[in-house]
Image: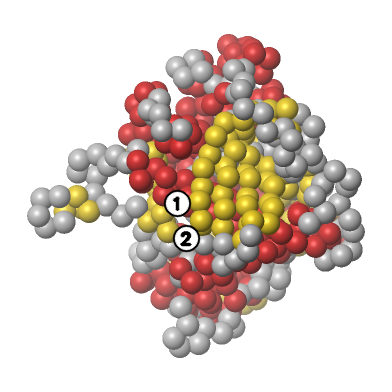
Amino acid sequence: MPTRHLRINTAAPDELKAALDALAAELELPTAFSPEVLAEAEAAAEGAALPAKDLTDLDLVTIDPPGARDLDQAVLIERDGDGHRIRYAIASVGSFVTPGGALDEEVRRRAMTVYGPTGSVPLHPEVLSAGAASLLAGQVAPACVWDVRIDSTGEVRSSAVERALVRSRAQLTYDQVQDALDGRAQLAEGVPADLPRLLAEVGRARQAQEVARGAVSLDLPEQVVELGDGGRYVLDSRTVLEVEGYNAQISLLTGIVAAEMMLGAGVGILRTLPPAREKDVAKLRRTAHALGVPWPDGMSYPDLVRSVKASTPEGAAFLNEATALFRGAGYLALPVSPGEGGDDGEGGDVVSTQHAAIASDYAHVTAPLRRLVDRYGLEACLAIAADTEVPGWVREALPELPSAMGARGRRASAYERGAVDAMEALVLRGREGEELRGVVVDVDEKKPQRGEVQVAEPAVHAVVEGEGLELGAEVTVRVAEVDVQARKVRVEVV
C-alpha cells in the first residue's frame, strides 16, 4: 500500500528522536545486528560466489535520491528496431546470503527495511546493503540482469534474466536526469547521452499501456519538515518529477514480466491486491467533493487519480486519502496451496493472481536489498529462465513467505504511520489555540463525535472531536492538544 513520504530536512529535535525511539521499542523493531550475523555478512562481502558471465561492458547507471547507498537497480536503454531494449540489473543478494545461515535467519526475521523521517532500520548489514551487494558506481558486483524488449507501443516482445557481473557507470539523481531531459544540463562523461530521452520514451509508452489496462497510478508527494522563522517547524512538499514516474515504469515492467514467467512455470510468488471496495470509492468521491476536486460523472477513479496534481494542498490531501483504495495487498505463493482460494462451485479453488491497482499479474523482484521476498522471486525467475530446477530452499520457503511479509509489512506500516504522527505533532507544536480550516475525512461509526480531519494548511491529519461530524464537511477547528513524544494531535470543531 502506498504510504506518505515525510522526512525532516534539518537536525531532528530531541523530543522527535525520543518519540521515534519509543515507537521502535513499542513495535519491537530489530535494530542492531548480532556479532555472528555481522561476521557472516563481512565474510560474504569478501568471498561471495561470483557468476561467470561478464556484462561489465554494459553502460548501466543507477537513478536514485541523493545520497542513497542501497542501490538495487541499474538501467540501460537502447533502441531496438521501432521499439526499445531494456537491460535492468538488480542486485544479486542471493550471491551473498547462504540459505539457513545466521544472516539468512536474521533477514527472514526482519523481512524488509523500515523507513523513518530520520533514518532507516535496514534489512541487511551495511557491509552488504551499502557495500558489496549494492550497485555502486565503478564497483563490479553480481546482478540479476533482465533483458526486456518492447515494441513502439510498449508491448513486451520478449524477456529473459541471467546472473552476471556488472559495473554501474554513474550514480545519477532524479534531478540530474530531469535537468538533462529538459535541456538544462548535461550528464557526466561515460553516461549514455540519450538515456533521459529513451527513458522518457519507454516511460510514456508504458504509462499509455497502464491507462489502457485501467491501472491506478498513485504518486504521493514527498513532504518535508523544515525549521522556519522563530524556531517553528513548517511543512512543505516536493512534487514527484516526471522522470521518477518513467523510472518507476521500468520497475513495474520488470515485475510484470517476472510474474508472467513464474505463472508460466507454476512456481514463485506474486504481489496481489483485490479490487477497491465500493464503500472506499464512495468515500473518496465525498472527499473529492469536499476538497473541491472535480469528479465528473462517468469518470473512473483511476482516471481521476491520474488527473489530480499533488502540487496543491487539496490535491495532496486527496491523493493521501486515495491510499484507502489499496487496502488488502498481499502475496500469493505458487503453486497455490489447497484451500487458499475461494470455492469455484465445483469443489475447486478460484484464486485471483492479479494486482488490481496495476491491472496485471505482478511480482516484487526489483528491490532485494530492501525486501526479503524479492530474493526468492529472483531466484525462481533465474532458474525458470535457465530451464533448471528452482532451488529447494526457495520452494520450501515460498508457502510461509506471504504470512511473514504480511506481518512484517504491518509492523513497518505502523512505524511509518507513527512517525508521520510525530512529525505532524512537531509541525503543530506551539500552535495550540490556533484555528485552522479542514475537511472531515473520517467519522468513527461507533463514536460519531470523533473522527479525522485533513487540515488544509499545514497539510496534516488530526483527530477531531465535535458534535454532528459529517464526512466531507468543511470545518474550522481549534488545535486543542499537541504532544510530540506521544505522537498525538487533537483538534476540536469551533
Q: Which residue is drawn at 57% across and 31% down?
A: 163
Q: How far apart are marks 2 and 1 (CA)?
A: 8 Å
Residue 100: image quadrant is top left
Relative side of 339 to 166, left or right: left
Res. 263 mark:
none
Q: In this view, does 356 lie above or below 383?
A: below
Mark 2 crowdedness (10 Å alpha carbons): few <14, some 14-19, many ≥20: some
Q: Which of 411 and 461 is in front in this view?
A: 411
Res. 358 mark:
2
Q: Is residue 446 above or below residue 487?
A: below
Q: Where is residue 233 in the image (x, y as percent from the top left)?
A: 78, 56
Relative side of 274 to 3, left or right: left
Q: Is residue 3 above or below residue 56?
A: below
Q: Where is residue 343 in the image (x, y as percent from the top left)?
A: 16, 53
Mark 1 crowdedness (10 Å alpha carbons): few <14, some 14-19, many ≥20: many
Relative side of 256 to 490, left or right: left
Q: Name the residue under label 1.
A: 362
Q: Is mark 2 on a helix, strand or loop?
A: loop
Q: What residue type is labelled 1?
A: Tyr
Q: What residue type is labelled 2?
A: Ile
Relative side of 76 to 338, left or right: right
| Number of numbered labels in the structure image | 2
Pointer 2 with pointer 1, Cβ within 8 A: yes
Q: Position of residue 108 (x, y in %)?
A: 47, 27
Using the rendered image of the protein, determine whether residue 242 is visible from the camera's viewpoint: yes
Q: Which of 294 and 215 is in front in this view?
A: 215
